[in-house]
Amino acid sequence: MQCWQQGTPDEFWGEFSENGKRLGYKAILLHLTAQRIAEDDRLVQLAKEEFGTKFLEVFSYVKNGKRVVKVKHAGSTEE
């Protein structure tokens, strides 16, 4: 919905069409998921560069008494 509201309908379908044919709902979701994963990867790399050796300490949490580094992408349903 956010992509739809950001521009015109023509801009939306320009991004979510292949060979002049509009993508279906599931294909659009897969495309958006791929974009989010790429953005997550880019941000992780920037954070690693900025935090250096402190990255693992800053981007982790304690689970069952053990420190765990966050490794799943934002759209993931797993921990």
Image (cartoon, rainbow, N blue to C red):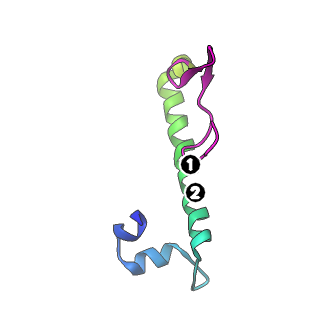
Q: Is residue 5 left or right of residue 55?
A: left
- How many other residues sit within 10 Å of disc 2, few (<14), some (14-19) or many (≥20)? some
Amino acid type at image mark 1: Gly
Picture disc at residue 58: none
Q: Residue at x 55, y 35 (%)?
A: 45
Whole-number angstrom distance, CA of label 2 to CA of label 1:
7 Å
- Secondary structure under tag 1 reads loop
Tell me where residue 7 sits by quadrant: bottom left
Q: Residue at x 57, y 86 (%)?
A: 20
In the rendered image, residue 24, in percent from the top left (x then y), is placed at 59, 77
- How many other residues sit within 10 Å of disc 1, few (<14), some (14-19) or many (≥20)? few
Amino acid type at image mark 2: Thr
Boundaries of the magenta span: 57-79
Q: Residue furthest bottom?
A: 20
Picture disc at residue 33: 2
- Secondary structure under tag 2 reads helix
Figure quadrant of the C terminus: top right
Q: Is residue 10 left or right of residue 66?
A: left
The answer to whether residue 22 is magenta is: no
Figure quadrant of the N terminus: bottom left
Q: Nearer the viewer, residue 44 or 72?
A: 72
Q: Mark 2 and 1 residues: CB-CB less than 8 Å, in contact?
A: yes
Picture disc at residue 75: 1
Q: Residue at x 62, y 39 (%)?
A: 72
Nearer to us of marks 2 and 1 is 1
Q: In this rendering, is residue 3 above or below 40?
A: below
Q: In this rendering, is residue 3 above or below 39?
A: below
Sooner in the amino-acid sequence: mark 2 or mark 1:
2
Q: Residue furthest front?
A: 64
In the rendered image, residue 28, in percent from the top left (x then y), is placed at 56, 69
Tell me where residue 44 sits by quadrant: top right
Q: Residue at x 44, y 74 (%)?
A: 12
